[in-house]
Amino acid sequence: MPAPSPLPAVLERFVREVRVEAARARETEAPALTPSLWRRFAESGDRLAYEAAYFERRRRLAALLLAAHLDAHLYARPDPALDDLLGSVCDEHTWILPAHAPDGDDPADRERHVDLFAAETAHTLAEAVTLLGDRIAPAVRARVRDEVDRRVLAPVQDRRWWWETCAHNWAAVCAGATGTAALALDSDRLPALLPRVEAALVSYRSGAAPDGACLEGPDYWAYGFGYFVYFAEALRARTGRDLLDDPHVRAMAAYPAAIDLGGGHRPAFADATGRGTYPAGLLDRLAGRLGVPVPARPDEPSFHDDPCYRWAHLSRTLWWTTGAARRPPAPQAFLPHAGIVAARAAGSAFAAKGGHNDEPHNHLDLGHFVLYAGGEPILDDLGAPEYTRDYFGPLRYRTPQAAADWHSVPLIDGAAQLPGRERAARVVAHVPGDPLLLALDLTAAYGTPRLARLVRTFTWRPGRLDVADAFAFHGGECQVEEVFVSRRRPVVGRGTVSWGPVTLRVPEPWRASQEEQEVRGHDGRPETVHRVRLTASIPTGTCVLAFRLP
């Protein structure tokens, strides 16, 4: 794939950053992946220490590869820094992360274990030697081909992997990256691998509802669906078969537009971020090939958009970004199978979710919602926390970001929502327009015997959001806490709560209080988050809470 010429003006920043990063990679030493860093996860559950060094190495590799590709006229001979780093990656004792080590973590098993990042590395190296050819030293090219085959292609062919039947991002990334690597190398293993890869991608697509929703959230949509598309386009170039020519794939491609809240914002449902950048090349390819709406670009593409510096995203941003006008998202969207609604107006937006409490990357959040005003989040979703061993174990729901009591949902008789597939919201009604209405039966989310029924109804119009909770209880009055979560500090006044431009009038007999807590975000940095509680003992009836926006 040649570098586009001339480059679209929208890529000027991206290319400038690539050249700066490549110069840095030539002038400074890459960090080592030491045994002590590897052990940190087993000893303390800490993932970030090893991953910081790992992704810094991938950052340098991507920059040197892209620079050599962009400036081919300057690289008639191999770049020693690139050759050295390719050799160093081939020397790594494993390409997986400690959190994904096989049971027992036997060093002998790590080298040929295939996780997300081993497959990604194989894809990066395979395209590197194919793309750059003689601009990589012959001995390095041969070593790279051998290592990709030995560490990833042969192990995938030789055994069945658990991720082949997954209905989430693991199937798409591991299979998609492996398949694209085999295509790039024109591997002799292609006849055996391609049917397995395509079957795994069918499993991946089965995890998306018929409406195309990605229950893992927008970041995992970019990850999993991105690798699905990258393989699909490589397969189409090779065989002419088009995996994108499918109504369900088209619905999946439209998911980012459905949940778009404007200005680069989206609801951070599941393990996600509320403001982020989708790979620009991926969106432009989907808009051009499928004609689906996609979110507007909040900024020009950057080399640093992906903190893991994945070659697949970065290379396709270079190759596929056009800068052409995109079809904008509609003002309102409803994903009925996921129970997600999103609505946008000038400077304000709202989104809410139903679903169930055993979704991939699940949070206990049925009936949860986010509210934006002035282009900024007011009531928020805390999104993904720092990933640790405990977060993916039995302590997951003690982490505020995943816990029910740090989502904007009620606590009933002191009890929060429970995990489980049977803990599901049911869409009672959806009426689009002005006003927009969504009603969700949340009864099954709770295990408290006092609750007979709970239906939460959202009514949205520009300038106002009403949240009406209709409770039915067994045995008279019941204590209820209405919870509202934000990153913005609330002000609790006499009969009101305000978050900057948004005001909630607190009806009788409810009493408002606020608290704050320090949590660690996905990048490991601490942040302070806020929670308002409205508390009352109430009989069967309906509580209507009206949020006024400017």
Image (tube, rainbow, N blue to C red):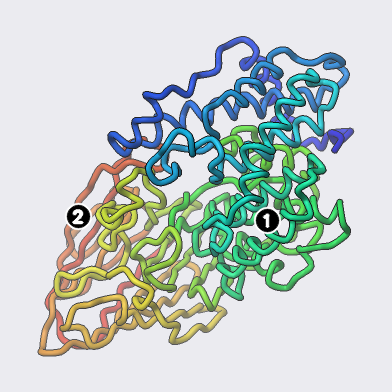
Report whether residue 345 is seen.
no
Q: In this view of the protein, which residue sits in the foreground, 419 or 327?
A: 419
Report which quarter residue 414 is drawn in.
bottom left
Q: In this view of the protein, which residue sits in the foreground, 284 or 44?
A: 44
On the image, the x and y values in percent for residue 17 come to: 67, 25
Whether residue 413 is situated above or below residue 499 in the rendered picture: below
Q: Which mark is residue 514?
A: 2
Report whether residue 56 is seen.
yes
Q: Residue at x 61, y 45 (%)?
A: 155
Question: Which of marks 1 and 2 precedes in the sequence?
Answer: 1
Residue type of the residue flagged with mark 2: Gln
Quarter of the image that includes the N terminus: top right
SS at badge 1: helix
Whether residue 144 is situated above or below residue 292 in the rendered picture: above
Report which quarter residue 125 is drawn in.
top right
On the image, the x and y values in percent for residue 411 come to: 22, 70
Q: Residue at x 75, y 31 (%)?
A: 128
Badge 2: residue crowd in 10 Å (few <14, some 14–19, many ≥20): some
Residue type of the residue flagged with mark 1: Phe
Quarter of the image that includes the C terminus: bottom left
In the picture, measured across the screen, residue 391 lies left or right of residue 320, that is left
Using the numbered discs, state the Cα–Cα distance from disc 2 to disc 1 in whole angstroms. Answer: 44 Å
- Residue marked by disc 1: 228
In the picture, measured across the screen, residue 20 lies left or right of residue 479, that is right
On the image, the x and y values in percent for residue 347 come to: 53, 57
Q: Which mark is residue 80?
A: none
Badge 1: residue crowd in 10 Å (few <14, some 14–19, many ≥20): many
Q: Residue at x 62, y 24 (%)?
A: 60
In the picture, measured across the screen, residue 307 lies left or right of residue 382, that is right
Q: Residue at x 31, y 68 (%)?
A: 419
